[in-house]
Amino acid sequence: MKHAVLALDQGTTSSRAIVFAADGTVLAVAQQEFTQHFPRSGWVEHDADEIASTQIAVATEALTRARLAASDLAAIGITNQRETTIVWDRATGRPIHRAIVWQDRRTAERCRALDAEGVGETVTAKTGLLLDSYFSATKIEWILDHVDGARARAEAGELVFGTVDTWLVWQLTRGALHITDASNASRTLLFDIHRGTWDEELCTLFRVPMAMLPEVVPSSARYGDAEVLGGSIPISGIAGDQQAALFGQMCTSPGMAKNTYGTGCFLLLNTGDDATASANRLVTTTAWRLEGADSYALEGSIFVGGAVVQWLRDGLKMIRRSEDIEALAAQVPDADGVFLVPAFTGLGAPYWDPHARGTLVGLTRATTDAHLARAALDSIALQSADVLDAMVRDAGIELAELRVDGGAARNNLLMQRQADILGVPVVRPANAETTALGAAFLAGLGVGFWTLDACAAQWRVDRRFEPASDSGPIAELRDGWRRAVERSRDWEPNR
């Protein structure tokens, strides 16, 4: 009798593992942070071996805490930070360079040059994405061009590429599987989301040998077995973290939307079998592939969401723990005209400005740390509102509600602020682990542990935040935010 599903939630700053029982309750959680490397301004790297070691360590720890053995698990589901790029030796499994993280902006000029050549429209038409260094293709190209002998080795078939899901499956199966699911493939700039396959023209454009690419598989199916956790466990679910959160929130019907407040913020709107093109600088992405059919979503990505709180904690030493931000911000009724634009690695949707940099405006002698804390929380909610505005224009719908998850969604002050700024209810589920839960649901579906109806029955409301009736102060706030954003833009070239 199988009792549970293990979800591996490999994020940008930490590796987590969560064991879910058959009714969706959490049996155990383990988490471990890993090192962030910043070699230059705008560059962000991870040690791929550290990603793997921490992820396997927390998986083992979570099983121990749940008092379960590998034989008790029905399946493993994997969800991961997307776009982060790893290239490794096919024979030895050794990375040839640190992982280049999704936040990294080193290839911004390369993307700008390609756009100047007039290829941007072709790239967007095929991939649904913008030609931006956020995505994987130019990161692969950079590694092949900057590691001695890498390009020749890649063309000889000696090197392979993977996003973090691919890397983890390779590690869990001791190199037996080189796969990715459609949701992760759709984030590389190399995948035609309409045909559902890798695209030879795109690979030629970005100078990526197709032999490097993993096999694209459904988001829910039995792929093979993990062999490193004390027994053979089916791996049967894979999805990029934001698509997994959309699924975990049971936003499985067109018109449903969620926002995840993690290191960044990611707002996704389910558009069903329609790969809706964006006229407002959002991206169209594959949400998941189930039973041979792809579902799609509109997405707006914010590079710095909860990471602004980490900056206040680690950079400015204003707070000791991230959760202390709520009490500090609550000491004042508002930010008193202070705006913090956390464009530390550029601005994402709907601006897509890799040269924007963090900006703090509106300071007076009366400004306190509480005002800065309030401005930091406002920045998360205001960036999300910018994305939602664009999304509503693209899809031509008005949202009934916004479902929320992620670490910062536990902040009641922020969630109420989000509802007030958006003017729609914000709904937080009882189970806040929606990203990991989505991966678990996909894995459970892949082996028949759950049905889709059983998954939907497990979604319940924890709290509903209704927007304030007076929208006057919000209009003034949003106008000030727009002016602050303009002051942050195109800063890097002028340094």
Image (cartoon, helix red, strand yellow):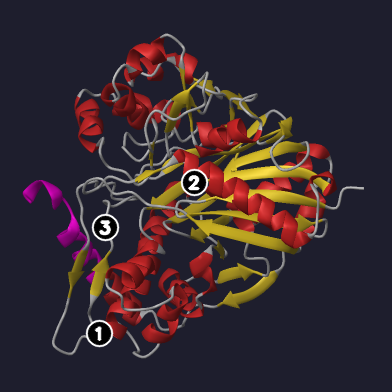
Residue drawn at x 69%, y 38% as measured from the top left: 228
Q: Residue at label 3?
A: 343
Amino acid type of the residue that numbered disc 2 sits on in the rendered structure: Gln
Q: Residue at label 1?
A: 336
Amino acid type of the residue that numbered disc 1 sits on in the rendered structure: Asp
Residue drawn at x 79%, y 45% as measured from the top left: 70
Looking at the picture, does residue 325 appear above or below residue 157? below
Looking at the picture, does residue 394 appear above or below residue 150? below
Find residue 105 and report its horizontal and vertical position in percent: 27, 42
Instruction: Report the side of 63 relative to 249 (left or right).
Output: right
Q: Nearer the viewer, residue 242 or 327?
A: 327
Say if the magenta span includes residue 364: no
* C-alpha distance separating marks 3 and 1: 21 Å
Residues marked 3 and 1 touching at CB (< 8 Å): no
Secondary structure under the numbered disc 1 in the rendered image: loop
Residue 173 lies in what quarter of the image?
top right
Please state the extent of the stretch shown in magenta in the rendering: 480-495
Find residue 55 and report its horizontal and vertical position in percent: 58, 48
Find residue 102 and report its horizontal and vertical position in percent: 39, 43
Q: Residue furthest left?
A: 494
Residues marked 2 and 3 touching at CB (< 8 Å): no
Q: Is residue 10 visible?
A: yes
Residue drawn at x 57%, y 59% as measured from the top left: 31
- Residue 81 disc label: 2
